[in-house]
Amino acid sequence: MQIKTTTHPGPDGRYRWQISCGYRGSPRGRRPYPTHSFALLACVVLPAHGVYFVPAGPPRIALHPRDLPGLLRDPLASLHEALATLDLDALAPTP
């Protein structure tokens, strides 16, 4: 799992995450993660305490503020959806 955070929405009002490793000031700079580095991404909106779980893949993630109340109301919904997309259901009860 990889965790990325944001503290405020961008100019268009959406919360955005750039999914890359490194940082601008490093000799290697920012770069894409190597393939299969992680399977699950937790995108955190810090001031709202909201977490949006998505499968790894896209280099950019955006969340509209109107979606935030749903994440707060059911914090595990996006986790279950992401796990189902990955054919994992670690939170399902065992038979």
Image (cartoon, rainbow, N blue to C red):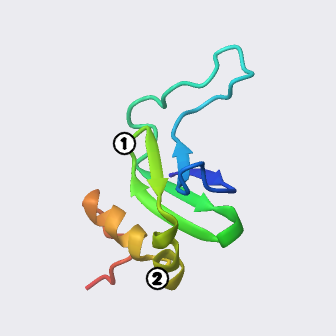
For the point 48% across and 71% down, which residue is it?
Answer: 66
Which image quarter: residue 59? top left
- Residue at the right extreme? 25
* Vertical position of residue 32 compared to residue 15: above or below: above
* Vertical position of residue 77 compared to residue 14: above or below: below
Q: Disc 1 on helix, strand or loop? A: loop
In the rendered image, the quadrant that contains the C terminus is bottom left
* Vertical position of residue 93 compared to residue 43: above or below: below
The amino acid type of the residue labelled 2 equals Asp
Picture coordinates of residue 80, whole percent (x, y): 36, 71
Give me the C-alpha separation between circle 1 and circle 2. 24 Å
- Residue that mark 2 sits on: 74
Q: Disc 2 on helix, strand or loop? A: loop
Residue 82: numbered disc: none
Picture coordinates of residue 17, whole percent (x, y): 54, 46
Crowd around label 2: few <14 · some 14–19 · many ≥20 (10 Å): few
Q: Earlier in the sequence, mark 1 or mark 2?
A: 1
Crowd around label 1: few <14 · some 14–19 · many ≥20 (10 Å): some
For the point 32% across and 68% down, which residue is it?
Answer: 81
The amino acid type of the residue labelled 1 equals Gly
> CB atoms at circles 1 and 2 under 8 Å apart?
no
- Asked if residue 26 lies left or right of residue 87, the reply is right
Give 95 or 60, whichever is nearer the viewer: 60
Which image quarter: residue 86? bottom left
Callout count: 2
Residue 57: numbered disc: 1
- Residue at the front extreme? 12
